[in-house]
Image: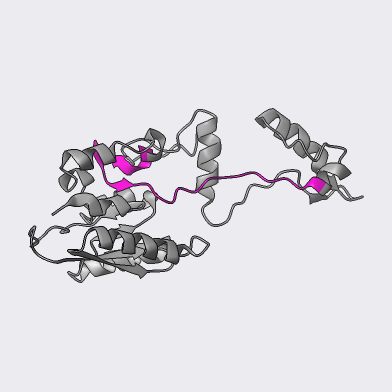
Amino acid sequence: MRMSWLKFGLCVLVLAGILAGTTARAAVELNMYYPVAVGGPITKVIDDMIAEFETSNPGIKVKAVYAGNYDDTRVKALAALKANQPVQLSVLFSIDLFELMNQDAIVPFEEVAASAEDKQWLSSFYPALMQNSKAKGKIWGVPFQRSTIVMYHNKEAFKEAGLDPEKPPATWQEMAAMAKKLTKKDAAGNVTRWGVHIPSTGYPYWMFQALCIQNGLELMNPEGNQTYFDKP
């Protein structure tokens, strides 16, 4: 089987049993569980990618199952595995890696991406994006929809605080200094507006992790069995 179908893999983890019973001549049907709760008309993007792939690989059909958010998708993928109907591909959250490994639910890409072309493709990603795709010396997932944390600032609040609305902070020190000026209190001394807001809902560790890495600290060890939440 040509392994080029892996190339539309997203933050994909290859589930166990993917090649069982297939031959180079047999028609192949693959199911992919995909979380759609990531914003935007992403289903059309994925459908178009699948259509392009199937045109180039007429012997392979891919069915995308849009399965809610990352948690919903993990639950459905593991339920299918327990029912002996494992899905072949799934887009799952990178923090699920060790749980999936412990349940023997996934196989490393090295077991299926064996050709020189496949190996070149696996090595084509930015190294930083592959950090949480690797464990125990193997690649268990490939990146696709990597989210990027952004900062935005309120220009009206900047004007009110006497700051240049066209010059947001460019360093940690500038952000701290501007945040102090932007913080507002009422007559009783109660804060009515904080100068900086870091969201703590959804996936708060993700934001916290970025802050820690930029300050020289990882949140866990590479083996995934120790965390450093108690480090100053």
- Tell me the quarter of the picture where residue 128 sits: top left
Residue 218: give x, y in percent of width and height.
Answer: 45, 34
Q: Residue furthest front?
A: 55
Q: Nearer the viewer, residue 51 or 140?
A: 51
Residue 147 drawn in magenta: yes
Judged left or right of residue 158, residue 153 is: left
Residue 18 drawn in magenta: no
Determine whether 83 is above or below 227 in the image: below
Residue 12: give x, y in percent of width and height.
Answer: 32, 53
Judged left or right of residue 44, residue 167 is: right
Judged left or right of residue 219, residue 192 is: right
Residue pictured at 22% horizontal, 43% vertical? 118
Residue 123: give x, y in percent of width and height.
Answer: 29, 36
Residue pictured at 54% horizontal, 29% vertical? 215
Q: Nearer the viewer, residue 181 or 23?
A: 23
Q: Which residues are magenta?
A: 130-155
Residue pictured at 16% horizontal, 52% vertical? 2
For the N terminus, the quadrant is bottom left
Q: Nearer the viewer, residue 143 or 44?
A: 44
Judged left or right of residue 213, residue 98 is: left
Residue pictured at 33% horizontal, 67% vertical? 64
Q: Is residue 45 visible?
A: yes
- Tell me the quarter of the picture where residue 51 sits: bottom left
Q: Nearer the viewer, residue 17 or 199?
A: 17
Determine whether 83 is above or below 91 in the image: below
* Colour setting: one colour
Residue 205: give x, y in percent of width and height.
Answer: 51, 47
For the C terminus, the quadrant is top right
Determine whether 89 is above or below 135 in the image: below
